[in-house]
Image (tube, rainbow, N blue to C red):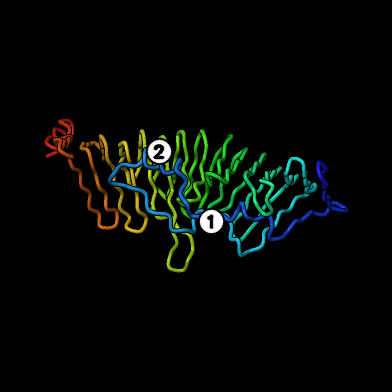
Amino acid sequence: MSGGAMTATGAGGKRVWLAGAAIFVVLALGTMQPASAQETTDAAAPAETAAPAATGGGMDFGDDSQPFELGADQGIEWRSKEKTYTARGNAVATQGDSSIGADTLVFYTSGEEGSFDRILATGNVKVTSGSSVGHGDKGEYDATQKLLLLTGNNLKIVSENDTVTARDRIEYWTGRNAITARGNAAVVRNDTRIFGDTATLYFAKDAEGKSKLSQIQADGKVKVLNNGQTIYAKHFAYNPDTDIALMTGDVRIVDGQNEYRGQRAEIDNKNKVSRILGGGQRVHTFIKPKSNDNQNSGTNGQ
């Protein structure tokens, strides 16, 4: 078969399936943190909001104890010279509760049995990881970095309570169980809107072993719309379990006609307690008085 090609096509328009244990290794992503992911995250995170350690679950793109399935409407082709599998036409690679789908999927092997170096997905890309579903025009997975990139137009991730969008790209960091949106990133969670140059969602396992969101972080020119308040800062972190949000770096909170400024702020939504601190600098609060027109109006009415 050296230098040749093997093609599987469906008879009568039936979908072609390729299943087995030999070609799922690339999707059985481990928990080792790549150096580049560590550098990227640490550069964005302030000391007060260090990212939680990877605990599995959120970024599990496969389990090597489970079978792997690759399906395509137009056929699956193996090229031994190029060492590639190509699935065309509504192609979907599935393992466990994770999948990658696209118009075309290409798996680049290293030559070793059961090993892939790279996956390239093009056209209507859809990535499912636990309860999160990501969309893009192109997807590329690098097994060395354990990184899946989504690029193109209308980049979006939808999960149970959150919708994340980005202009430039969405990164699935498998070792850190994190998803990062870059370029005009936005997170919509219930009635809260979070904007920043980047936004990162971290995942962990709950008591039942299911993946759940453990933290939302935004960095850069951060703007948060929450309960009638507009918050500006350089860094933002939110814990959905405690319902506490922490903002640092030139914090400015606009609440109606009132304004608060400091270097650090904490909002405890559960207990309805907010704090703003100076971080060694003076804290400023601006409370606008009632207008003279309102006061005069009340006097005239007596």
Residue 35 location, quadrant? top left
Instruction: Looking at the image, tell me whether mark 2 or mark 1 is earlier in sequence order.
Output: 1
Left or right: 209 with respect to 194? right
Q: Does residue 254 appear anywhere in the picture?
A: no
The nearer-to-camera label among 2 and 1 is 1
Disc 1 crowd, CA 10 A, few/some/many (<14, 14-19, 20+): many
Q: Does residue 250 appear anywhere in the picture?
A: yes
Residue 81 location, quadrant? top right
Left or right: 265 with respect to 226? left
Q: Which residue is mark 1?
A: 60
Numbered label tally: 2
Tell me the kind of residue under disc 1: Asp
At which x and y percent is residue 52? 37, 53
At which x and y percent is residue 168? 51, 33
Question: Does 68 appear above or below 40?
Answer: below
**Which residue is painted at 44% across and 45% down in the image?**
188
Left or right: 23 with respect to 56? right
**Which residue is painted at 43% across and 68% down in the image?**
207
**Which residue is painted at 73% across and 59% down in the image?**
19
- Residue at disc 2, secondary structure: strand
In-front residue for pair 29/277: 29
Q: Which residue is mark 2?
A: 195
Tell me the quadrant of the picture where the C terminus can be found. Answer: top left
